[in-house]
Image (spheres, grey):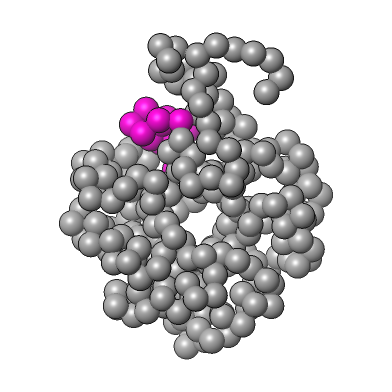
Amino acid sequence: MNYVLKSIPSRTVKPRNSGFTMAMDKGLSLREVEDFIEVSGDYVDIVKLGWATSFVTKKLREKIDIYRAADIPVYFGGTLFEAFVIRNQFDDYVRLLDEYQLSFAEVSDGSITLDHGQKCRYIETLAKQVTVLSEVGSKDAAKIIPPYKWIEQMRKELDAGAWKVIGEAREGGTVGLFRDSGEVRQGLVEEILTQIPEEQIIWEAPQKEQQVWFIKLLGSNVNLGNIAPNEIIPLETLRLGLRGDTFDFFLNL
């Protein structure tokens, strides 16, 4: 940090298991990636190339290499996994991970109907090759999954070999964990936390109000995802109580 302030919450350091920030790259240019890393790289633990943007991104390999040189892992969004699976191309997907030398993969079923046992088998297979992040929840706002089902699926996916489970919210934060207004489904989150350890969950929370809610519930070192590149520094100030929304929250440390 550039100077000393008292009563600042302690943040975990990279590589970390909690206090994890997942950024979403929805199509940054190579120069934008370089600038992003220069400004925010210290606060980014992993980058998701959103949904299937990697399919149309120019200079994809060069982009991944820039992140890799900064020790920031990259993975393809879960929608790309689903696009391969629905076309019966899972083996091609596995080869793709090898081709781009990726060490992480996301398994999701937010856009397709996938038997949960089969989803867990995909996790088991991929976990032999890479670190798996599995996403729970639907991208369909009309599909409301009861809390017991979230818990059951999260537990089974962790048992199948997922490193962490991701709570679905999409890039807009209006489905899954949240109502279409962006309001947190508080009862759902609290019930999940009675059964699944918080360090094993990444909460997709693209909106500032959602980030504030999770920080106040679980502290500075909550795992948050789907953060826009230009919101990484603002999120870090929220984590440290240096923005109005959390300004008073850590003063008594």
Q: Toward the viewer: 197 or 105?
A: 197
Residue at position x 66%, y 52% in the image? 72
Residue 202 is situated, as x and y percent measured from the top left of the image, at: 43, 49
Residue at position x 69%, y 42% in the image? 41
Question: Can the viewer see residue 58 in this picture?
Answer: no
Left or right of 189 in this view: 73: right
Question: In the picture, residue 123 is in which quadrant?
Answer: bottom left
Residue 183 is situated, as x and y percent measured from the top left of the image, at: 33, 38
Residue 192 is situated, as x and y percent measured from the top left of the image, at: 25, 48
Location of the N terminus by quadrant is top right
Image height of 210 relative to 3, above or below:
below
Question: In the picture, residue 162 is in which quadrant?
Answer: bottom left
Image height of 49 relative to 21, above or below:
below
Residue 200 is situated, as x and y percent measured from the top left of the image, at: 38, 51
Residue at position x 33%, y 31% in the image? 217
Residue at position x 73%, y 66% in the image? 60
Left or right of 197 in this view: 66: right
Location of the C terminus by quadrant is top left
Q: Is residue 98 magenta?
A: no
Query: Magenta region: which residues?
Result: 205-220
Left or right of 163 in this view: 91: right
Q: Main structural element of the magenta stretch: helix, strand or loop?
A: helix
Question: In the picture, residue 37 is in which quadrant?
Answer: top right
Image height of 250 relative to 103, above or below:
above
Q: Is residue 212 magenta?
A: yes
Q: Toward the viewer: 123 or 209?
A: 123
Question: Can the viewer see residue 100 in this picture?
Answer: yes
